[in-house]
Amino acid sequence: MKDYPTEKIRNLVLLGHGGTGKTSFAEAALFVSGAINRLGKVDDGTTTSDFDPDEIKRKVSINASLLPVEWEGHKLNIIDAPGYADFIGDAYSGLAAADSAVIVVCAASGVQVGTELAWEMASERGVPRAILINRLDRENANFGTALDQVRETLSKRCVAVQLPIGSQESFGGVVDLIDMKAYLGEKGTEADVPADMASEVEARRAELLEVVAEEDEELLEKYLEEGDLTPEEIRKGLLLGIESGDVAPVFAASSTKTIGVAHFLEAITQFFPSPADATYKTEDGKELQADPNGPLAAQVFKTTADPYVGKLTYLRVISGTLKADSHVWNANHNIDERVGHLFVVRGKTEEPAQQLVAGDIGAVAKLAHTLTSDTLTTQDAGLKMAPIDFPDPVFSVAISPRSKADTDKMSTALARIVEEDPILKVQREPDTGETILSGLGESHVEIACEKMKRKFGADVTHQTPRVPYKETLTASTSSEYTHKKQSGGHGQYAKVTIAIEPAERGEGFQFVNKTVGGVVSKTHVPAVEAGVHEALNEGILTHNPVVDVRISLVDGKEHPVDSSEMAFKLAGSQALKQGALKAHPVLLEPIVNVRVKTPESYTGDLVSDLNGKRARVLGITPSDRVTVIDAQAPLAEMQHYATDLRSLTQGRASFEIKFDHYEEVPDHVAKKVIEAAQKDH
Ligand SMILES: Nc1nc2c(ncn2[C@@H]2O[C@H](COP(=O)(O)OP(=O)(O)OP(=O)(O)O)[C@@H](O)[C@H]2O)c(=O)[nH]1
Ligand SMILES: [Mg+2]
């Protein structure tokens, strides 16, 4: 691919609800621009973007792909992001690298949950936005209805700059409301505006004029006086509105029929800013310009790991020029990195490049220390961009190797997939000993497990994590035990009396020696403690550790020859086991703090769902856009909350969860847990 100067580059990310045609649009853009000579199909698994085996199998995008398109002397770095909630992490990656966002909407479904989320993500980042109403050739497609929904739910500043000619089967081109011409078929052949569209054209054009006129005082004055604007004036207002993020133009297309695609690419080059038009801020607020001769700052937005090719680091050069065969400074880890080969990437193909200028996007192979979000700079410049703000994981599974051979491979595989996907988290749960893998939902962690097998040969199984129950004793008692074995040879003897008392929640295990007169010698006391501790860890009811108890050694007896540490340990352990049964053992469960953010309309349903999960709702705080519900709930009831919340709100709500404390399990619930634990053993 040719080298393009910064001003000729456009970086855009395709966002939107799952299945609206983002990948198909990217494919159409490659086809129309001549980059590929066969139009691939998502359903056949032949698109340039969805090349990953998991994507081909499921016919959905899982990873963000980079798809540079050359158009009229410009390079459009199109980033095709996934739409489904489980894979939304890569939409954050894509957005971090882009200067503008195109939100793809299905002409038959209109505004969906994913549309609203995409709009919010892009608005929060303050990037210019466009709306592409796609799938206009489909049954039930209705541009007008979809457009009205966009204007109602997203913003009145979303305004059509095109109208489709024909609809569904007869969709054949677009009318450009700026220059009032029609563009027909795949090639966009210029023609007159069809006469039967006159009234629709007039109405939508009036909406456009009103919105763009408000971008500039002179335009507004002229519009109010004359009731019209020239194409040049409309363009001027549109440019201002798009750049400030105030106005989002709406376009019309069918990706699979490649209609409206060429015209849209043209509009991107005309109306959307190049990296040179923007100012970027480092983490500490220093302003940067996309100047190829400026200091180097390049931010990593994605990392892929391949067992054969190794690590590939995707980055966006913000300032300066990144050169092949050079040394750079990783500002996050304060370490030198050697850059070997640089690549321009298109889907799965990589083309070597000598350099990447400010504003461009590409990849580097085999960096040693660099992770997603890091900034590469020079030691002198020391520039660091704010890290990408990925969502926190909310769904966890326990994973274990399927066979012994997989055990060794599992930890390497885990390290690799976490490096690829910064949302995934791995940790060992100390109380249950399980390895916990957390992500955004069931599919997210399932695909991660499949990837571990396919790419790194580690076959793992996954299940709902065990709840780390604990036990405690609620009554005081004492217990005496004599360990005695004195038949022939060297015997064993130890006698202990212990007092058992409940302690405050959170105090753990305390051991006090209250014996007097050396009835148990100094060396044997720790043995008693060890025996007691061991028995407590084994649990009384469920094989979960007993906590929050105070054990005192109050009396004992030794034999001059037969007593040993081992004998006292056994006596301690048995004394505890027998005594604990009299001390009213109960089960404790972890209680978590839950914070749910939801549109107000779901509050009632969510509160009653939480009540059904034995939760205590602590507060409901309504605000402008979202209502915040704070609650405490048993972890045992919340393990599938990510899935439940999604189905209750169609994915409109989000939540956070954090361990808070342990509490006694109500009797009727405890009974079931105890039965299950005893059966398990
Ligand atoms: N009729 C018609 N079908 C389309 C059009 N664009 C996409 N599709 C179909 O819609 C389905 C989803 O298309 P994708 O391109 O995978 O949609 P996507 O937005 O990339 O989906 P995710 O990445 O999974 O969110 C596929 O079956 C496409 O063939 C279109 O313009 N017209
Ligand atoms: Mg896709």
Image (cartoon, rainbow, N blue to C red):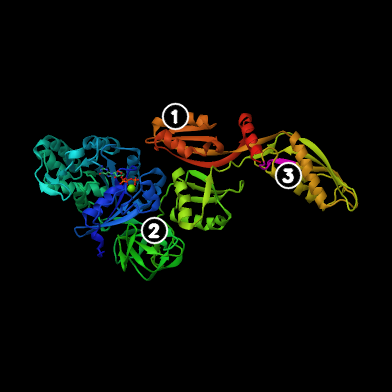
Judge depth for marks 3 and 2 and give the one in front. 3
Residue 110 colored in magenta in the image: no
Sequence-earlier tag: 3 or 2:
2
Residue 290 shows up from this direction: yes
Separation (CA) of disc 2 from disc 1: 41 Å
Separation (CA) of disc 3 from disc 2: 51 Å
Mark 1 Cβ and ligand 1 under 8 Å apart: no
**Image mark count:** 3
The local secondary structure at tag 3 comes to helix
Residue 392 shows up from this direction: no
Q: Which residue is mark 2?
A: 300
Q: Give the residue type that dot 3 points to.
A: Ala
Q: Which residue is mark 1?
A: 605
Q: Give the residue type that dot 1 points to.
A: Asp
Q: Is residue 550 left or right of residue 36?
A: right
- Residue 276's x, y, as percent? 26, 58
Q: Which residue is mark 3?
A: 535
Q: Where on the picture, by quarter, is residue 117?
A: top left
The residue drawn where x is 18% and y is 43% is 162
What stretch of residues is rendered in magenta? 543-550
Mark 2 Cβ and ligand 2 under 8 Å apart: no
Q: In the depicted view, which residue is nearer to us: 415 or 32?
A: 32
Up-down relation of residue 411 to residue 499 (above or below)? below
Residue 547 colored in magenta in the image: yes
Sequence-earlier tag: 3 or 1:
3
**Number of residues whose C-alpha sits closer than 10 Å to that of mark 1, classed few (under 14), some (14–19) or many (20 or more):** few
- Residue 521's x, y, as percent? 85, 51
Q: Label 1 near label 3: C-beta < 8 Å?
A: no
Q: Is residue 463 left or right of residue 570?
A: left
Q: Give the residue type that dot 2 points to.
A: Val
User: Main SS of the magenta segment?
Assistant: loop
Q: Where's ligand 1: which quadrant?
A: top left
